[in-house]
Image (spheres, rainbow, N blue to C red):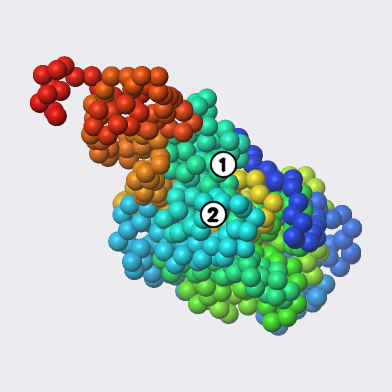
Amino acid sequence: MANRDQQIELWLLEEDEDILEGTPCSDDEESDHLEVQGENTDSEEDGDHDLGEFELNQTFASSASPAHVFTDEDEVPLSNLFYQSVDNTRWLKEQVRARRLMRQHNIVRVQSGPREIAKTKATSLDCLSLFLDDEIVAMITDSTNKRILIEQNKYSRDRDAKITDELEIKGLMGILYLCGSVKSGRENILQLFDAKKGTGMEAVYLTMNVQRFKFLMRNLRFDDPTTRAQRIMVDKLAPIRDLFQKIVKSFQKHYTPSSELTLDEQLIAYRGRCRFRQYIPNKPAKYGIKIFALVDCERPYTYNLEIYGGSNPGPLEISNNRFDVVLRVTEPIHGENRNVTMDNWFTSLEAAKKLFENKTTVVGTIRKDKREVPKAFRTTTNRTEFSSLFGFHENTTLVSYVPKKNKVVLLLSTVHNDGCIDESSGDKRKPDIITYYNRTKNGVDLVDKMCSLYDVARNSRRWPLTVFFNLMNISAINALCIYKANNGLTKVLRRQFLSDIALGMMKPLASRRMSTDCLPKILKLKISDFLGIPLDEQPQKVASSPRGGARGRCFLCGRKRNKTTRISCQLCGKFTCPDHCNYMCNSCYENHT
């Protein structure tokens, strides 16, 4: 347990107390519907105090029953052998199978970590390109250009609504990553691009001007906007589905998870209009888009994601029953002898049995109002603090633990087949099942914390853009996992890692911008310093004496500067201010001419 805590601390070395909330905005193009999830997922629940006489007799008989298997000759009442739940599920009071060091369905013979081409990626940008690859960038570029073509007639000048390309989209994502790395994701855009007052980030305004950034962010799309109206009638996730599925498939393609994973829900902060927006009061953001996530416990690598989209009419309709959600999200690891740790929103005896048939084990808290839980397990009556009650049903173990007065914790496991107590827990005498659960339950929560620490998200009224920001965050975390594994590193500053990714995506765009003819020279000089490339020296102009009375604007000064002068170049005759000309003696002048 201590080792797991140390691993989490290593991933969260740069954690602070910033809390990023969603955007309290609306979108006229999207209808709104809010669902409330008011159920409590805490592991501790109040114990019942109204046991029937039959269940009380069972509890007393359990404490007095001998530790061996009864035969017919013993003539012991059946109530001394098992607990019976409301749905008539019988839980044996004593396990009948001999304990083994490692059960066969817990053995994983494949080493976790990057696989296939992912093993060859050594740089931060190469690792990210496994997920946000050229195909993804091309898809975003094509969809965005279709949106720009629709919007072009609203602009009087063509240059204000130019179509984009892959290089510019990568530069845009690089800016988002850089802002996230310094926790400026939700900073005012004008302040972020301000080059005069000194409040802006130089790398940002050297890569792209503020008008272009705002234009691209307004028109960034991830599907064909010309056919969305038809598709969204049968698919609420149409604006993001194709992109989302491609990125999630790449998560599974390039990584082999460890033997232990966590299944939990993630709430992306969003307060705009959305037909499947959720309200979950026990989450930090409270309002947002719910995503079911399957995360590796060894590293904070997200292996599978599913957006909760409510009910979808038509061919894309899927069941949102908890049992079906568990089977769908864990499907990529079926048949691999891995374990999934989950909270009481997901855990049920039915799901545990089905997963066990698919060679996947479960450890999770379970609600006391489940019909398969016997009444004796729900109560604290006549039970001392730190006491445990065990029940065994086929390949499943149920434990009821009293951590404090009038509180009970219920867990179900198909990993454990005994009632062992963790001796390292001391006087609290925690069962091994609880120790295991505490060690493996934090996978999704760790990813949530890492996402909020360096969040690329900006305030937005469009929920597809909010989902894309989350995909960018998770892709960068997964890339960090692969980067550390390939380079054999245990400690990497994530801030520096994100900064390296951002600069790698921004510099090609800045280099192209530097070649623009109309760009002011002072800006070109700054870009050359940013890129570390010397700017090609322009030939020095030889100045002539002032022209009588005539004035003109210096052709080397920027339009905003608008500096006029009477001095003109001796060779080309263009007006040149003193800042952009040199004076020579007669001897040098004669040699030059």
Secondary element at image label 1:
loop
> Residue 190's x, y, as percent?
58, 36
Instruction: Left or right? Give the position of 196 relative to 219.
Output: left
Helix, strand or loop under label 2 = helix
Tag count: 2
- As shown in the figure, which amino acid type bears the numbered disc 2? Asp
The disc at residue 305 is: none
Give the image location of residue 212, x and y in percent. 53, 47
**Which quadrant of the figure has residue 365?**
bottom right
Residue at numbered disc 2: 158
Which residue does the image show at 89% across and 64% down from the upper left?
52
Q: In the figure, residue 545 lies in which quadrant?
A: top left
196 horizontally vs 50: left or right: left
What residue is pinned by disc 1?
A: 185
* Residue, far front: 548
- The local crowd at label 1, few if under 14, some if 14 to 19, many if 20 or more residues have their Cα within 10 Å, is many
Q: Nearer the viewer, residue 502 or 149?
A: 149
Q: Left or right: 7 with respect to 471? A: left
Q: Is residue 241 left or right of residue 320?
A: left
Q: Position of residue 101 (x, y in %)?
A: 46, 66
Q: Are marks 1 and 2 in contact (CB under 8 Å)?
A: no
Q: Amino acid at mark 1?
A: Gly
Judging depth in this view, the residue of 576 and 73 nearest the camera is 576
Place of residue 330 in the rendered image (x, y in percent of width and height, measured from the top left): 57, 70
Given residues 521 and 275, the one toward you in this image is: 521
